Image: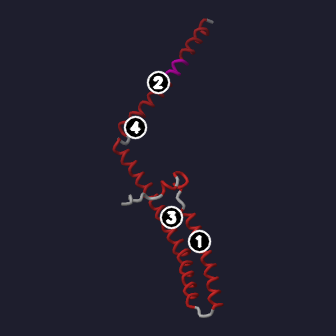
Amino acid sequence: MSGAGASGPVAGGGAVLLAVSILLLLAMAALERRLATYFLGPGPQELMRARIAELTATRSGIVEAVDDERRRIERDLHDGVQQRGVALAMLLGRARHARDHDRMAELVAQAYTESRRLLDELRSVAWRVYPTALDELGLRATLPKAPPCA
């Protein structure tokens, strides 16, 4: 019976030794990983180059998005507002040269309707171009600085 009693403490000590060995093994693996990253991983200059490349790519994307938005606004102005302005000028020119009073009144009425459409189109374009800084900072911050009057 003394043999069975002696195996209990030996087995318990073996389990503790096994647990300590596993913890040491894990610690050594973590240390090796850190050392490998330190000596074999990218250096500060490589990290800086990667960051610069990432910032350049994102900046390029932002510039492209702003250019696309500018082209869209130009297209809206050209296709909508400018066309309505030309139509209004033509109606007023025809009314100016009309010899018949009824025809002139009809053309002026059409010009008035066209001017209302032009204002609606301008309002719509202005709403899409509306700067968010106006909401956040107010009118004074969004207007360009004017040179002082002499």
Query: Compared to 80, does 70 lie above or below?
Result: above
Magenta span of residues: 15-21
Image quadrant in which the C terminus is located = bottom left
Position of 37 with respect to 76 (left or right) is left
Viewer-nearest residue: 42 or 44: 44
Q: CA distance from mark 1 to mark 2?
A: 75 Å
SS at mark 2 in the image: helix
Ranked by sequence position, the earlier of labels 3 and 2 is 2
Residue at the spot 59% in from the left edge and 94% down from the top edge: 99
Image location (x, y in percent) of residue 71: 49, 68
Query: Of the residues under marks 4 and 1, which one precedes in the sequence?
Result: 4
Q: Is residue 67 above or below residue 55?
A: below
- Residue type at mark 4 is Thr
Q: Residue at x 57, y 11 (%)?
A: 9
The alpha-carbon separation of the residues under discs 3 and 2 comes to 60 Å
Callout 3–callout 1 Cβ contact below 8 Å: no
* Circle 4 crowding by C-alpha within 10 Å: few under 14, some 14–19, many from 20: few
Residue reaching furthest to the top: 2
Identify the disc placed on residue 37.
4
Residue picked out by circle 2: 24
Question: Which of pointers 2 and 4 lies earlier in the amino acid sequence?
Answer: 2
Label 3, on which residue?
69
Category of crowding for the residue at label 2, using alpha-carbon neighbours closer than 10 angstroms: few (below 14), some (14–19), many (at least 20) = few
SS at mark 1?
helix
Instruction: Indicate the quadrant containing the N terminus: top left, top right, bottom left or bottom right.
Output: top right
**Mark sitting on residue 121:** 1
Calculate the distance from the C-alpha at mark 2 to the C-alpha at mark 4.
Answer: 20 Å
Q: Residue at x 54, y 14 (%)?
A: 13
Residue 55 at x, y = what percent? 42, 51
Q: Amino acid at mark 2?
A: Leu
